[in-house]
Image (cartoon, rainbow, N blue to C red):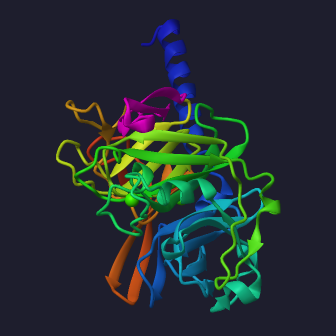
Amino acid sequence: MKTPRSRLLFLVSIIGGLAAAVLAAAPAPASLARLPLEQNGGTWPTSHVQGIAVDVQGGFIYYSFTTLLAKYDFDGKLVGTLVGWAGHLGDLDFNPRDGRVYGSLEYKKNQAFYIAAIDVSRIDRVGLDAAQSGLFRTVYLPEVVNDYTADLNGDGVFDGDTAKTVDHRYGCSGIDGVSFGPAFGHTDGPRLLTVAYGIYANLTRTDNDHQVLLQYDITDWGRYERPFVESTPHHSGPATVHGKYFVRTGNTTFGVQNLAYDESQQRWFLGVYKGTKQSFPNYLMFAVDARTSPSLGDLVGVPGPGGKGTEAGRLLALAADGLADPATGIRGWNQKADVGIQPVGHGLFYLAASSGTKGEQSGKVTLHRWTGTPEVPFAPATTADLKRPTTP
Ligand SMILES: [Ca+2]
Ligand SMILES: [Ca+2]
């Protein structure tokens, strides 16, 4: 027979159990239940899928296929496509503040680099033309052009779009990863557009071992935006950046392919193609915590002014998570995140994969749940994850 005290404990444990059950069964946000677990972004006569953007509230997924932007709804229906540029549209992000998709746009032959701001709400049919539709506006990035075209050996010759040169400051090949997020060192405040450099793979130089991230406050970008006219490339853009930051990961092939800010972990994710320098661990994904303050320090391997000493820059430390390389102290994951990674809250991420041959490229996204395991940081999400997300 139970004593009054044990009865009380029994009752408390019953009530506690009921409360836990109710909490676990608490309805997930309605927007979460609509997320497709996977989606095929179609097959297109283009280069491979470069990046994705997700409008969680509106219910759309956008795919950059380099020279084509595809818009699908959460039911998997193709809503429309935008075409008509020869440049390289890379990574994307959706800006909920103005309802537009922002993407990196490269014209290496013209030595011109832009952010494209695309009014995706008006993409309603297949084959819309970027110029004629007026949906596609661009802002020029002089900071990137300056680093890309830098004649580092001072021979008066810029060697152009090639990795086999000592030109290109920091090894800059252009831009790719883009994402909105807070100023580095902060989790709140205005959302800045962060743009990551492409960096050429080159084993013979030491000044290409940092990722370079530019942050822009785009509040006044309306005055720079120009309609898209490919035949007459404009040079309208901000002369300065809000901040320029460096992350030492070791040289990776074409820098940060995909950049994404995850609100639920308050963390930036950098997806890369594998690096080739044997002295580095060559992880495929890196992270920087939003709270990590930039600190002025040596950019190891980058010669200082006049070739003397080492250049100083604002460094961002890698998140203390994932695999660890004792020799370099570099942290990261062997997780493919190079053609599309987009967090959608609650510890859930879309990861993209490409397939197909040249001129017939397919892209597919699959919803994943963050596990935090160093070896396998993502697991495929299930319907149960949408009903009862493990991360609030
Ligand atoms: Ca030169
Ligand atoms: Ca992105």
Residue displayed at 70% across by 62% down: 57
Q: Residue furthest front?
A: 155
Q: Is residue 379 left or right of residue 224?
A: left
Q: Quadrant for the C terminus, please.
A: top right
State the residue in front, 26 or 358.
358
Q: Is residue 269 magenta?
A: no
Q: Is residue 217 left or right of residue 310?
A: right
Residue 350 percent location from the top left of the image: 48, 61
Residue displayed at 64% across by 83% down: 230
Q: Residue 170, relative to residue 69: is it above or below?
A: above
Q: Is residue 308 left or right of residue 343?
A: left
State the residue in front, 85 or 151.
151
State the residue in front, 188 or 68.
68
Residue 337 percent location from the top left of the image: 39, 58
Q: Residue furthest left?
A: 278
Q: Is residue 307 magenta?
A: yes
State the residue in front, 103 or 319.
103
Q: Quadrant for the N terminus, please.
A: top left
Instruction: Report if residue 89 is visible in the image.
Output: yes
Instruction: Report if residue 337 is visible in the image.
Output: no
Q: Residue 87, relative to residue 117: is it above or below?
A: below
Q: Residue 218, relative to residue 64: is it above or below?
A: above
Quadrant of residue 364 within the rendered picture: bottom left
Q: How many marks?
A: 0
Q: Magenta residues?
A: 292-319
Residue 74 percent location from the top left of the image: 60, 73
Residue 62 percent location from the top left of the image: 58, 72
Residue displayed at 77% across by 58% down: 221
Quadrant of residue 227 within the rendered picture: bottom right
Q: Quadrant of ligand 1?
A: bottom left
